[in-house]
Amino acid sequence: MTTTPLEIPDVSRRVHLECDVLVIGGGTAGSMAAITAAEHGRDVLLLEKAHVRHSGALAMGMDGVNNAVIPGKATPEDYVAEITKANDGIVDQRTVMQTATRGFAMVQRLERYGVKFEKDSYGDYHVRQVHRSGSYVLPMPEGKDVKKVLYRVMRERRMRERIRIENRVMPVRVLVSEGRAVGAAGFNTRTGEFVTVSAGSVILATGASGRLGLPASGYLYGTYENPTNAGDGYSMAYHAGAELSGIECFQINPLIKDYNGPACAYVGNPFGAYQVNRLGERFVDCDYWSGQMMAEVAREIASPRGPVYLKVTHLPEESIAALEGILHTTERPTRGTFHAGRGHDYRTHDIEMHISEIGLCGGHSASGVWVDENGATTVPGLYAAGDLACVPHNYMIGAFVFGDLAGAHASRHGVRPGPLPEDQVAAAHELVYRPLRHPDGPPQPQVEYKLRRFVNDYVAPPKTGAKLHVALEAFARMEGEIAAMGARTPHELMRCAEVTFIRDCAEMAAQASLMRTESRWGLYHERLDVPERDDETWFHHLNLRKGDTGRMEFVKRPVHPYLVPVDGVEHRPGRVEYLGSLSVRAAEVAGVRQASGAAGSPRLLELVALAEEQPDLAALEPYLGDDDPAVRRAAVATLTEVVPAGFEFALV
Ligand SMILES: Cc1cc2nc3c(=O)[nH]c(=O)nc-3n(C[C@H](O)[C@H](O)[C@H](O)COP(=O)(O)OP(=O)(O)OC[C@H]3O[C@@H](n4cnc5c(N)ncnc54)[C@H](O)[C@@H]3O)c2cc1C
């Protein structure tokens, strides 16, 4: 039975909401941002596409804090140095220092809310050493309840009066007027109603871009990340004109083969677990969870010494029981079932590990929205906190810290703006409801699968200029397919909007990876065609933004002078350098296909973009006479596809 498609609501028939501080995404960072802004006396609106009580990365349970800097156990300076090393020097230490110096107070605040952290017999926080230097991992024995605790705080009477939560409401665009963020537009994913919001300031807290690559299982939502985090905030920040940084520094994580949950070496290692190859040899040589470590894991898996395992079978019964308690209850209840289904048990089988699909995530690597030490983006009134912000390796405690900072800073704006920019409201309305106009168009799962397969084939490391060019052609081509997707229900509309975010993230990932013509961060940005690290040219942040012409443009930003000197990393001063758009520089920066002289030509990309605009013959003429035969061939194909007026006779 086919469902009758939802009726498209008129753009004027909308639910309109107002607030001082709008928080988009009610996970770790968003919940904390809302609580802090409310504590500052602001009227807060928290919009969550799922349900705040159990949404986001925390909802799956958290077994411990990855990066707690507890006085007496570690120093902020050690932590900042560690993160700087793990990120090959490209770090704004001012942001990382916030997490280092405020993380402990945040642990205590969470404890006051009711979150439990492991303590030793003296009542001290029982941090564990997982890496060779520094003890930062603080177990949370009842970590499965963190989100419930936060929700309870937000529902306390004093908070309820200040924080309005709207579950199942999904913004798709931040609205910008006279250069500052003034609200958002989106829709209700259950009723299909169109929703607009006027706000004094906007905090994006929508988590990672976790549905970028396809997991090895092929399941669209079987991702390492919480699958509602489709890169919404990355796309919204981009379209609002904010800068994003380090997008080429992908997230890739170790996980359990075929299960796509984290392998949890962080949990296992303090109990005596460790990573081995099939010969039982240890192979991970680097200190911190980093791209370098992922490169070592990937190399070992691909070598004759693979597969690789988390070795647990040697552990005594009480350690195994403790591990099962944490991993099969707090972390993911399905994990025990998964192992049992294969007849595996930690007493008899080590855990086979693999590497995850690629994603963008400040929290695990460094790819995110560019923020200062208060979470402010380059657009006044717009903030970003949590995994979508570029504060390297920030994890859960960093998401809380930056949620708090953004909530406090955003509260300073207060003033509600004037009328919303109706052209942007109309564009958001079109983005949301477009699939209802052609309900039998290609279904979202099919289009998303295809898009993410291209990501796996051409963007995932090891990268090459030629592959990245092919990716960009595919993503440009797919704009048409995405616009043609069909939907009938509000839920399907949500999925279709998510595909547009994934495409935006895919394009940013490919363009940024092309632009940085060196290899850095181990596997995260391994370019086979430019395998060396080039500090001379690239000891810089690479930022991207949507330019005034609507095209993606790049800026190199110098690394701010270090607050903490780091052994083995030489800081290099630099200056801001505008790099322009990739298509203009494509021939210089990319290894386009040489043999036939084509495949990645920027002229081809221009032509693909032109084809979307129903060009007339005059517009196509320069391409029909292009020097490059591939461009000429593509121009003829475009001609037969678009059939400009007056040309039909030649094609019968
Ligand atoms: C599997 C896994 C294990 C981890 N383990 C640990 C660990 O042990 N220790 C540790 O310190 N860190 C860990 N982390 C990292 C930590 O969980 C994250 O860094 C942190 O929770 C990120 O918080 P966030 O607020 O950015 O994202 P989230 O908490 O995921 O919140 C994002 C929210 O935004 C919502 N959303 C998305 N798009 C929209 C939209 N358009 N409109 C409305 N809402 C939207 C989502 O539904 C979600 O609720 C882990 C992460 C994962 C994925």
Image (tube, rainbow, N blue to C red):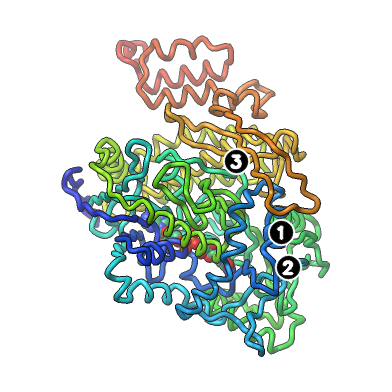
Image height check: is 155 above or below 517?
A: below
Query: Mark 2: which amino acid?
Result: Gly
Residue 222 visible in image: no
Name the side, left or right, on which 609 lies relative to 19.
right
Taking depth in this image into account, of 641 and 521 the one nearest to the observer is: 521
Identify which residue is drawn at 78% across, 65% down.
277
SS type, badge 1: helix
Q: CA distance from mark 3 to mark 1?
A: 32 Å
Q: Residue at x 68, y 80 (%)?
A: 346
Name the residue tied to disc 1.
Answer: 82
Label of residue 143 in the image: none
For the N terminus, give its image quadrant.
Answer: bottom left
**Kind of residue at badge 3:** Tyr
Indicate the position of residue 238 as horizontal and vertical percent values: 45, 41
- First along the sequence among labels 2 and 1: 1
Rate crowding at label 2 as few (under 14), some (14 to 19) or many (20 or more) other CA atoms within 10 Å: many
- Quadrant of the rendered structure where residue 640 is? top left
Local crowd size for mark 1, using a 10 Å CA cut-off: few (<14), some (14–19), many (≥20): some
Closest to the camera, between mark 2 and mark 3, is 2
- Kindly identify which residue carries mark 2: 134
Residue at the spot 80% in from the left edge and 53% down from the top edge: 567
User: Label 2 vs label 3: CA separation?
Assistant: 37 Å
Instruction: Tell me: 617 left or right of 211.
Output: left
- Is 408 drawn above or below residue 377 in the view shown? below
Is residue 266 or residue 134 the one in the foreground? 134
- Measured as percent of width and height from the top left, residue 384 is found at 46, 52
Residue 390 higher or lower than 309, as above or below: above
| Residue position marked by numbered label 3 in the rendering | 458
Assess mark 2: CB under 8 A from ligand 1? no
Task: Label 3: state its secondary structure.
Answer: helix
Q: Nearer the viewer, residue 162 or 428?
A: 162
